[in-house]
Amino acid sequence: MAFSKFVTFLVIFISTVAIASAGNFYQDFDITWGDGRAKILNSGQLLTLSLDKSSGSGFQSKNEYLFGKIDMQLKLVPGNSAGTVTAYYLSSKGGAWDEIDFEFLGNLSGDPYILHTNVFSQGKGDREQQIYLWFDPTADFHTYSILWNPQRIVFSVDGTPIREFKNIESSGVPFPKNQPMRIYSSLWNADDWATRGGLVKTDWSKAPFTASYRHFNANACIVSSGISSCDSAQSNKNDWFSEELDSTSYERLKWVQKNYMIYNYCSDNKRFPQGLPQECRMT
Ligand SMILES: *[C@@H]1O[C@H](CO)[C@@H](O)[C@H](O)[C@H]1NC(C)=O
């Protein structure tokens, strides 16, 4: 009967859409190192990385992306996480690579994590910013997002923008826009620099340290054999492809920079005695 066929179609259609948008770690990622320390759980809905004295662990996306809006929820190593670093980033390959980085630097129980960000274009980084978060990132999952379109890269936390890197190629600053990137994440020991500049060491009696991931969602152009999924006529690039920050978002970005920023390379005159990098002089 036509109606029941329609209902069956609808049920199949809705469940397919739901699966596609929920993301599945088995489908989207490969565990790349850590000898069993990285695990995909709950039928692909949860991924955990762990670190102990012998090794950390990591994963990477199966797909390569060229532009997108990519969300991931992370719950960071709780308790005494001093010395640990959880890195979550996009990167291309080769000597002139592009990279968009989130790095979470652990701390002693009750002391704040640092969220460190950086942008590399054509192998050049040196664009570090650091902030504290306005919540405890170990108590629950929070959403860390990257909007990457031809005009800008925006880092957001729970929908609040924390950083914008604009395309100002016309002023001679290279912008990541030609090299597809994979998503990578790893949990590792960096107690030579991570916590209070290396003063606080990892307490291995608290190992294993564990960070958790869920709700991956990518509205993105997938590149395979040099062809972007966004090139085909039917695929309408969504709003994100031309998304910009509205005035409310700029207010929130300013709020973060005013209240939570610890370090901004653009204010580090000592580091750049010959003058601040070009992109810092444009805003
Ligand atoms: C750890 O806590 C100390 C003391 O509050 C603080 O100075 C530091 O910025 C925090 N974060 C890291 C990663 O060191």
Image (cartoon, grey):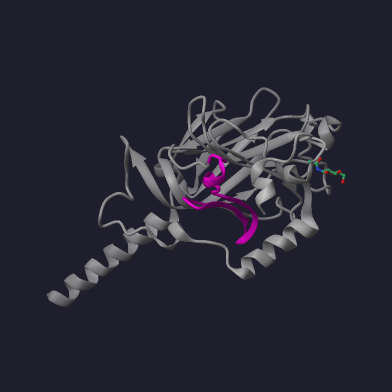
Within the image, what quadrant is residue 271 found in? Answer: top right
Residue drawn at point x = 63 percent, y = 38 percent: 87
Quadrant of picture, ligand 1: top right
* Percent of width and height locating residue 45: 48, 50
Question: Can residue 271 be seen in the rendering of this structure?
Answer: yes
> Is 60 left, or right, of 104 in this rendering?
left
Residue drawn at point x = 43 percent, y = 63 percent: 239
* Percent of width and height locating residue 220: 42, 51
Q: Which quadrant would the N terminus be assigned to in this image?
A: bottom left
Question: Can residue 135 be seen in the rendering of this structure?
Answer: no
Based on the picture, tell me whether residue 283 belongs to the magenta stretch: no
Q: Is residue 47 above or below residue 92?
A: below
Residue drawn at point x = 53 percent, y = 33 percent: 122
Q: Is residue 131 above or below residue 198?
A: below
Number of numbered discs present? 0
Based on the picture, tell me whether residue 168 belongs to the magenta stretch: yes
> Is 212 left, or right, of 268 in this rendering?
left
> Is 28 left, or right, of 265 in this rendering?
left
* Percent of width and height locating residue 52: 68, 29
Q: What residue range appears in magenta? A: 147-174
From the viewer's side, name the closer residue of 218 and 106.
Answer: 218
Q: Residue furthest bottom?
A: 3
From the viewer's side, name the closer residue of 216 and 151.
Answer: 151
